[in-house]
Image (cartoon, rainbow, N blue to C red):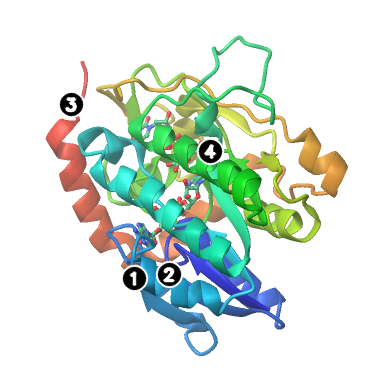
Amino acid sequence: MRVLVTGGAGFIGANFVLRTAARRSEVRIRVLDKLTYAANPATLASVADTVELVQGDIADAELVDSLVADSDLVVHFAAESHNDNSLSDPSAFVQTNLVGTYTLLEAVRRHQVRFHHISTDEVYGDLELDDPARFTEHTPYNPSSPYSSTKAGSDLLVRAWVRSFQVPATISNCSNNYGPYQHVEKFIPRQITNVLSGVRPRLYGDGRNVRDWIHVDDHNDAVWTIIEKGTIGETYLIGADGEVDNRTVVETILELLGRPRDAFDFVTDRPGHDRRYAIDSTRLRTELGWQPQYVDFRSGLSATIDWYREHESWWQTAKDAAEQKYAVTEKVLG
Ligand code: NAD
Ligand code: DAU
């Protein structure tokens, strides 16, 4: 089976490539990645003999057409993925998340290639802290940020291409991922690497915002489950019942690293900051039989801390660049 993985040098895509290469010898993997600031080609060094890395843009129609023509399956992870960046400059988000996805859809339409689109729970907007509801496949779209609105738009493009052109596609919307190889601009690796660098963790707003954490391996196993057992044209929500507020995450990181639990700072809030996300993944579990393996967030977090402690050379350069960006807008409060 020939699989084209877009965004395979980023966090979730690279974990997908490494896990697939280790477990599925029948799969020939080719990665298409623009190698933006978010990518780290070093992540794929251990599979360089078997995985081909093509540096290129998913919005490059000619390149995409030739790669899709030589594939049986496209797994589409590539995106501009960070909300804070989308607030300072949305242009790359529109280009990659919308035009890039459109370009891939036209190629899979021409060649009738199976397509799986990776998306996010953020397309559903946010929930109040005390709302008993969780997101399901039937929740109306209500995105808040330039990032989530472009992901919502890309999902709608996929649905339209399925209905209008019979493109054989599925969609998954997953909650917040954590694990190895995540860029240090994101919340959990930022706070871990802050503490490892002797800097206090930084909480936006009041720190009570809730995210629904899932280990990246559980996400990627769910993706394979949907590819193999899912129904064409359908959407599946991926989540592992991992709701935790941001303050608790920071306190746990500090505790696991042997620091006082209150050794953090509050900083200026993210504009339009979504309050809470929560996924109901009943459909994926009951219809397709997927179950998460990482059910204890604290031990998954502890293993992730160990990984960052042992891989400083992987993150140090990106850390300096990310903190320079944050320094422009972020102010420590009180
Ligand atoms: P990431 O930012 O770590 O990686 C994105 C990758 O896409 C990078 O390697 C980057 O170089 C590549 N890329 C960006 N623009 C490109 C372009 N125009 N052409 C080709 N490659 C390009 O992102 P991630 O966190 O791994 O997220 C991967 C996917 O999963 C995204 O679609 C994201 O919306 C979705 N998602 C992420 C999470 C999460 O918690 N991180 C949760 C749910 C869904
Ligand atoms: O829900 C899925 C989404 O999760 C994905 O679609 C996105 O690609 C991914 O980036 C993530 O989005 P979030 O905005 O939830 O993730 P982020 O890591 O940026 O922030 C997580 C929470 O932590 C959020 O409430 C903001 C807060 N935060 C973030 C940073 C970077 C802080 O309090 N301090 C920080 O320094």
Q: Residues within 10 Å of mark 2 (few under 14, many from 20)?
A: many
**Looking at the image, which residue sits at the far bottom?**
49
Q: Nearer the viewer, mark 4 or mark 1?
A: 4
Describe the element under mark 3 as helix, strand or loop: loop
Where does the C terminus fall, quadrant-wise?
top left
Rounded to the nearest whole Å, what is the CA distance between mark 3 and mark 1?
A: 36 Å
Towards the viewer: 45 or 229: 229
Q: Residue 56's mark? A: 1
Question: Type of residue at label 2?
Answer: Val
Q: Are marks 1 and 2 in contact (CB under 8 Å)?
A: yes
Q: Position of residue 135 (x, y in %)?
A: 65, 25
Mark found first going from the N terminus, 4 or 3: 4
Mark found first going from the N terminus, 3 or 1: 1
**What residue sits 39% from the left and 62% below the top?**
58
Rounded to the nearest whole Å, what is the CA distance between mark 4 and mark 1?
A: 24 Å
Count of numbered labels shown in the rendering: 4
Question: Type of residue at label 1?
Answer: Gly
Towards the viewer: 97 or 281: 97
What residue would you read off at disc 2? Answer: 64
Is residue 327 shown left or right of residue 211?
left
Describe the element under mark 4 as helix, strand or loop: helix
Mark found first going from the N terminus, 4 or 1: 1
Rounded to the nearest whole Å, what is the CA distance between mark 2 and mark 4?
A: 20 Å
